[in-house]
């Protein structure tokens, strides 16, 4: 059967993710019995997730709550929305109400829904350059033209952002929102400074543009100081937040949220219903009990975060030891470090060779970029591998680096 003629025109905007290709190749090698060290995934560590506790909660919920195997309202379990509102007030200084929270299938569901209700084909969307590949794909699949603004160690470069906005407006193009991951950015690991956060809000206000704040890594912060989300600094309702418990509970639960007000909230909700009915009910109940019984404090803050901090430090030490002089980012939040190979190096070719010859899986940075830059970038994940794997993975990466450059 030839299906091409049946496909919608917009299907031609759908592109595969280079990330999925890396993972596919890795699993092919693994199925042939090749042992790999993966520094590629965007997952937390199953050993740093209280699986025993979650197992207990799951059994208790399934046995005790008949509604746990049924649909919830499309915007999610009311008790969970209430709990998350309190949780965000306490840990993020975000003042929101359960009514403004819609529980989604992870942050991914939240971003897709926002894209669907905000983007018309041909609209321009500004993102950081580089930015999270799945979101870039999601927006492009809806017909958006993505324009990137470079980041440095303080986050998005706001002067360049301002110039870019002026250019877009002067070309007569429609610009609706800026998508940003201010804390523990994917793929760079960079966290936006408070000064830049304020500048970003001012620029958006001046040009009347929405901001989508992707808070995926806001609960993965390794320093004791407060990092206020954009939403907590926003006085105009200009910031729409997408959040998730993926990195805390585990990526498999698929519990995320949008915080939106007014007509935007209403349209997101109407769009959502025919797509998924509701986020997984059992996961919503587990998330509710996890938060309500204080496991975020008792476990994630006390055991999880120190574990991830140690692994981040181990990766930085290994990079310094085995690749002295190499350029890489030093994150204070998130799960990633971006390593830059020498300027003219091909990160794609390097990643392929590293997997095939040294058994180490990393993600080339190039697909995260909105332009032709980033050819020499490599994204490294420190949250999922063990400390031993991090050390061995970086040592092997350095062997190939020295052979090649
Ligand atoms: C920046 C960013 N946003 C959103 C997500 C989506 O996460 P989830 O759909 O599991 O909540 C991820 C996952 O890696 C991410 O890195």
Image (cartoon, rainbow, N blue to C red):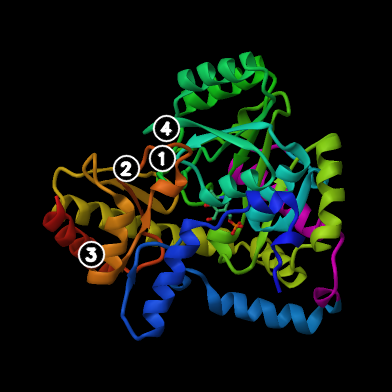
Residue 341: x %, y % from top left: 24, 46
The structure residue drawn at horizontal position 68% and vertical position 32%, both measured from the top left corner, is: 123
Cα separation, mark 1 vs mark 2, equals 7 Å
The residue under label 4 is 151
Which numbered disc flags the more N-terminal residue, 4 or 2? 4
Q: Position of residue 79 (x, y in %)?
A: 80, 59
Q: Residue at x 71, y 47 (%)?
A: 258
Quadrant that contains the N terminus: bottom right
Mark identifier at residue 85: none
Q: Earlier in the sequence, mark 3 or mark 2?
A: 2
Residue denoted by label 2: 329
Residues marked 1 and 4 touching at CB (< 8 Å): yes
Location of residue 137 in the rendering, given as x and y in whole percent from the top left corner: 58, 49
Q: Residues within 10 Å of mark 3 (few under 14, many from 20)?
A: many
In the image, taking residue 349 as reference, residue 53 lies left or right, namely: right
- Return the x and y of residue 299 as percentages of the image width and height: 51, 64
Crowding near the residue tagged with mark 2, few <14, some 14–19, many ≥20 C-alpha atoms within 10 Å: some
Q: How many numbered discs, if any?
A: 4
Q: For disc 1, does the CB lie below 8 Å from ligand 1?
A: no
| Residue bounds of the magenta highlight | 67-95
């Amino acid at each position: 059967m030839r299906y091409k003629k049946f496909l919608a025109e917009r299907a031609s905007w759908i592109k595969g993710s280079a990330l999925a290709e890396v993972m596919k190749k890795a699993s092919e090698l693994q199925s042939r019995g090749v042992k790999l060290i993966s520094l590629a995934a965007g997952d937390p560590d199953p050993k740093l997730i209280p699986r025993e506790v979650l197992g207990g909660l799951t059994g208790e919920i399934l046995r005790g709550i008949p509604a746990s195997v049924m649909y919830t309202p499309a915007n999610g379990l009311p008790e969970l929305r209430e709990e998350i509102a309190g949780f965000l007030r306490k840990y993020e200084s975000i003042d929101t109400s359960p009514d403004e929270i819609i529980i989604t299938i992870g942050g991914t569901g939240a971003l897709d829904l926002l894209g669907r209700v905000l983007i018309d084909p041909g609209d321009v969307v500004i993102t950081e350059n580089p930015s999270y590949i799945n979101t870039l794909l999601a927006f492009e699949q809806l017909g958006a033209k993505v324009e990137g603004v470079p980041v440095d160690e303080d986050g998005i470069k706001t002067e360049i952002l301002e110039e870019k906005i002026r250019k877009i407006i002067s070309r007569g193009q429609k610009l609706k929102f800026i998508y940003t991951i201010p804390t523990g950015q994917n793929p760079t690991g960079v966290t936006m400074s408070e000064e830049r956060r304020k500048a970003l809000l001012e620029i958006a206000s001046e040009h009347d543009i929405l901001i989508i704040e992707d808070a995926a890594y806001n609960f993965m912060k390794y320093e004791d100081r407060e990092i206020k989300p954009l939403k907590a600094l926003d006085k105009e309702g200009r910031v729409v937040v997408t959040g998730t418990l993926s990195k805390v509970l585990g990526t498999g639960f698929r519990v995320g949220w949008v915080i939106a007000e007014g007509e935007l909230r209403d349209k997101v909700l109407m769009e959502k219903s025919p797509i998924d009915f509701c986020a997984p009910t059992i996961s919503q109940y587990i998330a509710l009990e996890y938060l309500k019984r204080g496991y975020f404090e008792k476990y994630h803050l006390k055991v999880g975060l120190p574990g991830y901090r140690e692994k981040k430090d181990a990766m930085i030490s290994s990079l310094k030891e085995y690749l002295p002089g190499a350029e890489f980012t030093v994150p204070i939040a998130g799960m990633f470090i971006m390593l830059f190979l020498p300027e003219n190096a091909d990160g794609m070719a390097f990643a392929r060779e590293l997997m095939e010859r040294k058994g180490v899986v990393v993600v080339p940075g190039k697909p995260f970029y909105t332009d032709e830059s980033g050819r020499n970038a490599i994204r490294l994940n420190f949250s999922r591998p063990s400390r031993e794997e991090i050390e061995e993975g970086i040592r092997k990466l350095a062997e190939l680096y020295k052979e090649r450059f």
